[in-house]
Amino acid sequence: MKTFVAWMAWGLALALCAGCSKPAEPALDDSGAAPAEDAGALQPPEPVADAGAQVAPAGPLPQGEEKDGQRVGRWTFFHANGKKSAEGEYQAGQKHGPWTYYYDNGQKTAEGTFERGEKSGRWVEWDEAGQQVSDKNFVDGLEALPPR
């Protein structure tokens, strides 16, 4: 009986710790559909550990390099069907430089630049048929209004 109880305790510990392992790779809320929170503007992938993040569907793991626990250099993310969902550069764990996002059919959904984790400069978005749907300018992560 003691052995049975010990095995049950071991199983319970494993079950409770199932979520203790390294968090899943980021959910790409821009994985082919424009996120609702910014009326069509794409948001960068965020780690699952962040509040409100969702687990990405099973598919190829993201490819990139980490240094001292932070993403650095070029990273590529994938949809569950194996096609690319996003690619761009990280610097000291923050998106920095040009980024491109893709629908799961392979068509570009958005393209723009990040500076120290914030959208910067021109961001262009397309629908799944390849038609441009927006062309916006960002300063410090906020959409800049056109001059009057």
Image: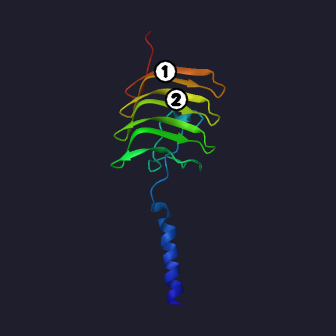
- Confirm whether residue 28 shows in the render: no
Residue at image coords 47%, 31%: 99
Local packing at callout 2 (Cα closer than 10 Å; few below 14, some 14-19, many 20+) is many
Q: Which mark is residue 85?
A: none
Residue at image coords 65%, 34%: 105
Residue under pointer 2? 41
What's the amino acid at mark 1? Answer: Lys
Percent x, y of residue 59: 59, 48
Foreground pick, 35 / 112: 112
Percent x, y of residue 31: 57, 38
Tell me: residue 67, above or below residue 101. Answer: below
Outermost residue to the top = 148
Residue at image coords 53%, 48%: 61
What's the amino acid at mark 2? Answer: Ala
- Confirm whether residue 20 shows in the render: yes
Q: Is residue 30 left or right of residue 114?
A: right
- Locate residue 84: give its quadrant: top right
Q: CA distance from mark 1 to mark 2?
A: 9 Å
Q: Which mark is residue 136?
A: 1
Percent x, y of residue 77: 52, 41
Are discs 1 and 2 less than 8 Å apart at CB?
yes
The secondary element bearing badge 1 is classed as: strand
Q: Earlier in the sequence, mark 1 or mark 2?
A: 2
Q: Is residue 91 left or right of residue 45?
A: left
* Image quadrant in which the C terminus is located: top left
Outermost residue to the bottom = 1
Local packing at callout 1 (Cα closer than 10 Å; few below 14, some 14-19, many 20+) is some
The secondary element bearing badge 2 is classed as: loop
Foreground pick, 13 / 142: 13
Q: How many marks?
A: 2
Tell me: residue 86, above or below residue 60. Answer: above
Foreground pick, 41 / 124: 124
